[in-house]
């Protein structure tokens, strides 16, 4: 069987001068006859084990990278709104088409300004301190769970549910964990509001606070706020997910 390529062009070697995650998000321009800005993933896409398709965070980051490649470096992102209609396959390359809808200008005038205060939580001074848990592209040193699902996982944690239809052999459920299982958990849409891009430091600690204000009709909503170590609210994220509980089967003697 012929080997399946996941990039449009031959994959270059990883750039050792960049962080591993920078190589993952790298894009290559694609020639376009109509003059539209088109990009594709430079390296193969990441399909996490057990997931339906390509990790959604990769698609979000690459789409933002594509947009940023078409504007001056002085332009900052202020929000992103993403809808996940179908799972992207890692078997084929992804194309990112960028359309310029409007170029806005910021004005130096009086503005409303307020921000929620950072919770009184202490964080280590050394970013490398403590034991971390590596998983794929990411490493978490603040929480002891899968950082890919920790945000939307707020929905099952507040009910103390198991995120697995059946627990993996290596995992043990907590003694007080309820019998209900999550049968389906899939992201429907995700909005990111970046308030202070200049205050984001990926080499330093950030504090996140997550809550779920509503769940029902097989959907759930989660809100996340992210602070820098010096108390600046740098971003607010909102994610909606499809959530279905595993239904209890009717005993055969009752059929």
Image (cartoon, helix red, strand yellow):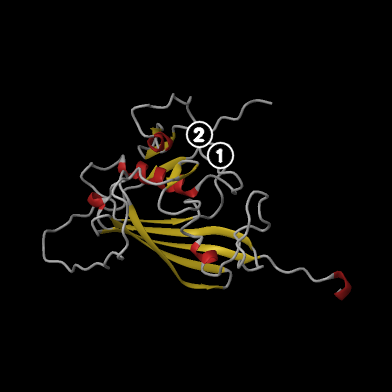
Label 1 and label 2: CA atoms lie apart by 7 Å
- For residue 10, which numbered disc appears in the image? none
Q: Position of residue 142 (x, y in %)?
A: 40, 53
The answer to whether the residues at label 1 and label 2 have Cβ atoms under 8 Å apart is: yes
Q: Is residue 100 visible?
A: yes
**Relative vertical location of residue 122 with respect to residue 13 in this rendering, above or below:** below
Whether 145 is drawn above or below 178: the answer is above
Q: Which mark is residue 44?
A: 2
Taking the spot 37% from the left edge, 26% from the top edge, the residue there is 16
Quarter of the image with the N terminus is top right
255 relative to 175, above or below: below
Closer to us: 100 or 141: 141
Crowding near the residue tagged with mark 1, few <14, some 14–19, many ≥20 C-alpha atoms within 10 Å:
some
Q: Position of residue 175 (x, y in %)?
A: 62, 65
| Disc nearer the start of the sequence (1/2) | 2
Helix, strand or loop status at disc 2? loop
The C terminus - image quarter: bottom right
Where residue 32 sits in the image (x, y, percent)?
40, 34
Question: In screen coordinates, is 130 left or right of 74?
Answer: right
Q: Classify mark 1: helix, strand or loop.
A: loop
Q: Which residue is farthest left? A: 109
**Along the viewing direction, whichever of 184 and 124 lies nearer the viewer:** 124
Q: Residue at x 18, y 69 (%)?
A: 112
Please tell me in which quadrant of the rendered image residue 185 appears. bottom right
Residue name at image x 19 percent, y 67 percent: 113
Q: Residue furthest bottom?
A: 254
Classify mark 2: residues with Cα within 10 Å, few (<14), some (14-19) or many (20+).
some
Position of 5 relative to 158 (above/below): above
- What is the quadrant of residue 105 in the picture? bottom left
Q: Is residue 88 left or right of residue 233?
A: right
Pick whichever, 162 or 53, lies toward us.
162
What residue would you read off at disc 1? 90
């Amino acid at each position: 069987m012929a080997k399946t390529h996941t990039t449009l062009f031959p994959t270059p070697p990883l750039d050792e001068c960049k962080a591993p995650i920078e190589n993952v998000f790298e894009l290559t321009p694609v020639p376009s006859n109509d003059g539209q800005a088109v990009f594709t993933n430079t390296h193969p896409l990441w399909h996490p084990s057990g997931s339906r398709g390509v990790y959604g965070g990769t698609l979000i980051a690459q789409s933002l990278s594509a947009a940023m490649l078409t504007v001056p470096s002085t332009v900052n992102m202020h929000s992103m709104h993403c809808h996940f209609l179908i799972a992207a396959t890692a078997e084929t390359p992804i194309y990112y088409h960028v359309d310029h809808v409007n170029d806005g200008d910021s004005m130096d005038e009086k503005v409303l300004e307020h921000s929620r205060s950072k919770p009184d939580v202490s964080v280590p001074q050394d970013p490398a301190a403590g034991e971390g848990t590596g998983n794929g592209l990411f490493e978490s040193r603040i929480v002891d769970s899968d950082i890919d699902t920790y945000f939307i996982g707020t929905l099952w944690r507040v009910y103390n549910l198991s995120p697995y239809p059946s627990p993996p052999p290596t995992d043990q459920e907590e003694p007080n964990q309820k019998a209900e299982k999550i049968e389906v958990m899939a992201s429907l849409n995700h909005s990111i509001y970046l308030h202070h891009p200049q205050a984001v430091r990926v080499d330093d600690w950030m504090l996140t606070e997550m809550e779920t204000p509503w769940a029902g009709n097989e959907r759930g909503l989660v809100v996340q706020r992210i602070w820098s170590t010096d108390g600046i609210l740098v971003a607010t994220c909102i994610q909606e997910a499809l959530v279905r509980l595993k239904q209890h089967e009717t005993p055969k003697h009752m059929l």
